[in-house]
Amino acid sequence: MKRFTAAEARRIGEEIGIEWGSAPFDVEQFRSGLDVELEHGLHDPTTNVTDDDPVTTAGRTWPSASTASSTRRGRRGCQPRRSWLDARSF
């Protein structure tokens, strides 16, 4: 099964609007979330909703990373920019 590198996670995060300096989670937490969300990709046709597309996978990851991190740190999670969502159909 595919795994994301930290460099890929950083690039994908930047592509969807994550500002790493102010995000309530770090690149490694996001990378780990990307890997977890791949279980909703090509790995299993019955749960495939992302087709292993990095941006779609990131869209499923970002809210989870924000919520988990804000719970641990007592901070409010950040919200993704909508522009990349508008261009995609889920």
Image (tube, rainbow, N blue to C red):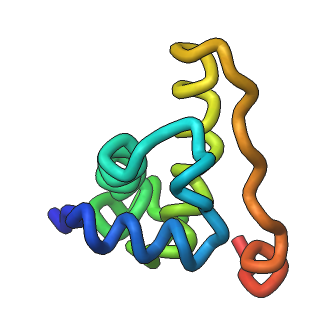
Q: Is residue 51 visible?
A: no
> Picture quarter containing residue 10?
bottom left
Please, is residue 64 above or below residue 44 in the view? Answer: above
Left or right of residue 74, residue 48 in this image: left
Q: How many marks?
A: 0
Foreground pick, 70 / 22: 22
Residue at image point 56% right, 16% down: 73
Left or right of residue 74, residue 13 in this image: left
Q: Position of residue 40 (x, y in %)?
A: 43, 55
Q: Residue furthest left?
A: 1
Q: Position of residue 19 (x, y in %)?
A: 61, 60
Q: Residue furthest bottom?
A: 87
Left or right of residue 4, residue 50 in this image: right
Residue at image point 76% right, 73% down: 85
Residue at image point 73% right, 78% down: 84
> In the rendered image, which quarter contains the N terminus?
bottom left
Q: Is residue 25 visible?
A: yes
Please, is residue 78 above or below residue 39 in the view? Answer: above
Residue at image point 71% right, 34% down: 77
Left or right of residue 57, residue 89 in this image: right
> In the rendered image, which quarter contains the C terminus?
bottom right
Q: Position of residue 81 (x, y in %)?
A: 79, 66
> Picture quarter containing residue 78?
top right
Foreground pick, 69 / 51: 69
